Image: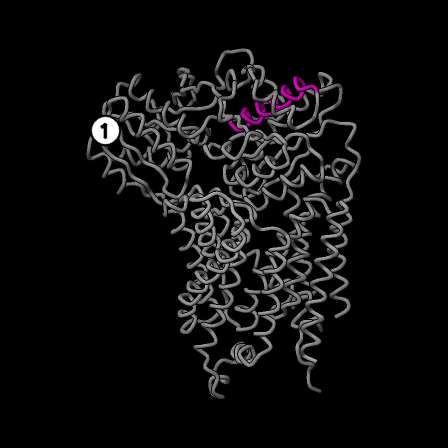
């Protein structure tokens, strides 16, 4: 009995002891959050790389406000409760003056109220849910939101692909894919097109033939598939088997080399909207791709680019604010006008970035930059 | 004697409360500690209530967070709906407490429904049914648009403070302890030890098995409601199988059937997770050991394996702390 208590007490005491913080006043402390474990672990890894790369560049140039930047990173595990804990940790324990992150909207939504009440500015990297920045004036984001991507996709399908009839397929258990499809439908209809099919499928299924047969019966010119790449690959194959010849259009969930690997010829000549294109010839993009590839031996995906941008936007704001005071940084962030990898960024009244999206075509198994579409 | 024991438990709780409040006021415990303590307390509610089902009544539930989801969504919907209609006013606290209890009742109804299969099923089979139940709840929540569907229920007002969570946790511990050590609890224990024998001596096994699920679900539902009002979001993925498994781990690490064990495990495991987070950061940044953040979960799992290897019955086995025992044991 006594021994058991001792074991338990030891666990608690050991844990408590390790909380004794160290002196971080010498540096500008910035918190970084991303899911390194859990369902979105791959997103988290490239997000962390993006933060690290940007911070090391700033530090090589002499840091910010004459001090080195110290990035304190925390894993949110893709869980809101963990998110609330690590946001609090970074602010209260590590005394971070600003927070970068996080990826998933549901986690950012749990962290945002904490930043707001502590008056610490945060930039969510890839949280596309419109409600995230609605939490308060200290909450910003680096990515465009679901309505924008769906809208751009619809505009591209109608204007450039000259489609008159479109059908949508999405995952009912995923807010991101559902949101994209809903906004695609709204814009496509507003432009004068007709959405002839709008079907959801269950999460984790691998047979989409029932839904595909239904939406393809109305002979759409374009099939809008807002799923993630793993589902898209199967959907593309099955759509071709059912005789669909037109292009598939989707969102940034398609951004993976695995897509063309799995889908092969079925995905040829299809398009998706993305935050940036690795093939974009502008120097800022090429410089980022070069540095990232050299450091991490892998091509940067959009998550890495967004994390890199979020870090640059935040550090730029801190240096313009001239202080690490939360309110001062917030004031500087609002006035941001910075050229970053994913475009020229300014924030609108809702603290969402106003920037363009790129359209990427899948050609010969490669992602090829097609065009840039402004909202 | 009985009254004295109850007083002792209340006093222990009160001392904990005062110590935390004082340390928090003087700044020793910062907001980070308070979040961990709040999550530990809610973890206690989940673990103790699951212990009633798995440890005391001897059933096997793998879908405990499903009940928490029902509570979280019910209470969250009530408060968001009411505060959408009118701005904040002094009666808010009353609405909040009523909403949390309503969440508990809704979860209890779900517990009543899931209790029925337990009449026919045992062990692994019951585990599968409860696992399925948890997933069904998650899928239903994903598909109801007015609670946010896959976006989750957003904009829940922040009501759960340390005091509120503490009061609910104490109530959970006291009420479940009293239940376990009443004649009802003895009947539940007899079902765990030998269902056939207890039926032969006249225990209404049907009633007590369902009651175990109903009461367990009620407290889990209230815990879910408190969690939702702490995080200001309720999301279907928070209540999946993985989350239920974490609670199950608390119950087993603490000792199946021991409420004290569940309480200690909920605190130790929550603190351990955060301690590892900070410890690994320290090892890497200060001590220069090249170790990645993702190793926290590996070490956590290793520690769990070690605990279970060396304390196969959990930290406390089936023992209780003396302040949690109402009557002294005979002989």
**Residue B270 locus on image (x, y percent):** 65, 53
In the picture provided, is A25 more to the left or to the right than A215?
right
Queried whether the magenta region covers residue A312, the answer comes back as: yes
Residue stretch in magenta? A302-322
**Residue B19 locus on image (x, y percent):** 75, 56
Q: Which quarter of the figure is the C terminus of chain A placed in?
A: top left
B154 or A39, nearer to the observer: B154
Q: Which of the 4 image quadrants contains residue A329?
A: top right
Q: Residue at x 68, y 77 (%)?
A: B3
Q: Of helix, strand and loop, which one carries label 1?
A: loop
**Secondary structure, magenta segment, majority class:** helix
Chain containing the residue with disc 1: A
Q: Residue at x 74, y 61 (%)?
A: B15
Q: Which quarter of the figure is the N terminus of chain A placed in?
A: bottom right
Asked whether the viewer can see residue A293, the reply is: no
**Residue A336 locus on image (x, y percent):** 57, 18
A322 or A240, nearer to the observer: A322
In the picture provided, is A67 more to the left or to the right than B99?
right
Asked whether the viewer can see residue B137, the reply is: yes
Q: Residue at x 61, y 60 (%)?
A: B167
Vertical comparison of A347 with B291: above or below: above
In the picture provided, is A64 more to the left or to the right than B191?
right
Q: Which residue is mark 1?
A: A220
The colour scheme of the drawn protein is: one colour
How many C-alpha atoms fall within 10 Å of the one at disc 1: few (<14), some, or many (≥20)? many
**Residue B36 locus on image (x, y percent):** 66, 50
Q: Which of the 4 image quadrants contains residue B110?
A: bottom left
B207 or A295, nearer to the observer: B207
Vertical comparison of B56 with B87: above or below: below
């Amino acid at each position: 009995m006594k021994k058991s208590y001792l074991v338990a007490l030891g666990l608690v005491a050991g844990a408590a002891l390790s909380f004794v913080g160290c002196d971080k006043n010498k540096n500008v402390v910035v918190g970084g959050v991303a899911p390194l474990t859990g369902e979105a672990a791959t997103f988290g890894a490239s997000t962390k790389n993006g933060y690290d790369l940007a911070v090391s560049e700033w530090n090589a140039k002499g840091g910010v406000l004459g001090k080195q930047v110290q990035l304190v990173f925390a894993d949110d595990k893709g869980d809101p409760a963990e998110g609330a804990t690590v946001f609090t940790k970074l602010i209260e324990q590590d005394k971070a003056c600003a927070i970068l992150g996080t990826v998933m909207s549901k986690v950012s939504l749990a962290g945002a109220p904490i930043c707001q009440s502590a008056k610490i500015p945060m930039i969510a990297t890839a949280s596309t849910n419109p409600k995230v920045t609605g939490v308060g004036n200290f909450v910003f984001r680096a990515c465009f939101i679901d309505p924008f991507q769906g809208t751009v996709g619809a505009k591209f399908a109608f204007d450039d692909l000259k489609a008159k009839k479109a059908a949508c397929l999405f995952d009912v258990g995923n807010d991101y894919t559902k949101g994209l499809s809903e906004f695609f439908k709204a814009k496509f209809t507003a432009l004068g097109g007709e959405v002839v099919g709008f079907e959801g499928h269950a999460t984790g299924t691998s047979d989409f033939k029932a839904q595909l047969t239904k939406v393809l019966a109305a002979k759409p010119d374009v099939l809008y598939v807002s799923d993630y790449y793993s589902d898209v690959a199967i959907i593309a194959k099955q759509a071709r088997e059912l005789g669909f010849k037109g292009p598939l259009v989707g969102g940034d969930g398609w951004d993976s080399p695995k897509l063309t690997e799995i889908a092969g010829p079925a995905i040829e000549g299809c398009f998706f909207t993305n935050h940036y294109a690795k093939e974009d010839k502008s120097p800022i993009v090429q410089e980022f791709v070069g540095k990232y590839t050299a450091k991490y031996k892998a091509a940067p995906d959009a998550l890495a680019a967004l994390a890199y941008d979020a870090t640059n936007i935040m550090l730029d704001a801190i240096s313009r604010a001239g202080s690490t005071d939360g309110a001062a940084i917030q004031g500087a962030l609002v006035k941001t006008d910075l050229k970053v990898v994913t475009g020229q960024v300014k924030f609108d009244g809702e603290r969402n970035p106003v920037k363009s999206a790129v359209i990427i075509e899948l050609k010969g198994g490669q992602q090829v930059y097609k065009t840039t579409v402004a909202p | 004697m009985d009254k004295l024991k109850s007083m002792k438990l209340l006093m222990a709780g009160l001392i904990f409360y005062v110590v935390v409040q004082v340390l928090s006021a003087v700044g020793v415990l910062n907001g980070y500690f308070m979040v961990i303590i709040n999550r530990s307390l809610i973890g206690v509610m989940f673990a103790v209530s699951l212990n009633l089902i798995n440890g005391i009544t001897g059933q096997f539930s793998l879908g405990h967070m499903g009940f928490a989801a029902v509570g979280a969504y019910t209470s969250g919907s009530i408060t968001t709906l009411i505060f959408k209609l009118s701005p904040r006013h002094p009666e808010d606290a009353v609405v909040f407490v009523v909403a949390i209890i309503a969440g508990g009742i809704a979860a209890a109804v779900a517990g009543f429904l899931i209790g029925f299969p337990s009449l026919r099923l045992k062990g692994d089979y019951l585990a599968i049914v409860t696992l399925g139940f948890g997933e069904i709840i998650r899928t239903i929540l994903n598909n109801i648009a007015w609670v946010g569907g896959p976006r989750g229920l957003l904009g829940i007002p922040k009501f759960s403070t340390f005091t509120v969570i503490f009061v609910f946790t104490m109530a959970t511990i006291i009420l479940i302890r009293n239940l376990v050590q009443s004649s009802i609890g003895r009947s539940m224990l007899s079902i765990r030890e030998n269902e056939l024998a207890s039926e032969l001596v006249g225990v209404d096994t049907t009633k007590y098995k369902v009651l175990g699920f109903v009461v367990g679900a009620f407290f889990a539902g209230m815990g879910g409601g408190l969690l939702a009002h702490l995080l200001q979001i309720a999301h279907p993925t928070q209540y999946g199988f993985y989350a239920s498994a974490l609670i199950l781990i608390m119950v087993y690490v603490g000792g199946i059937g021991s409420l004290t064990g569940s309480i200690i495990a909920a605190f130790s495991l929550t603190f351990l997770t955060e301690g590892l987070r900070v410890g690994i950061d320290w090892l890497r940044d200060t001590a220069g050991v090249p170790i990645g953040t993702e190793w926290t979960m590996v070490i956590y799992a290793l520690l769990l394996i070690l605990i279970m290897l060396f304390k196969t019955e959990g930290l406390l086995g089936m023992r209780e702390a003396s302040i949690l025992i109402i009557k002294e044991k005979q002989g």
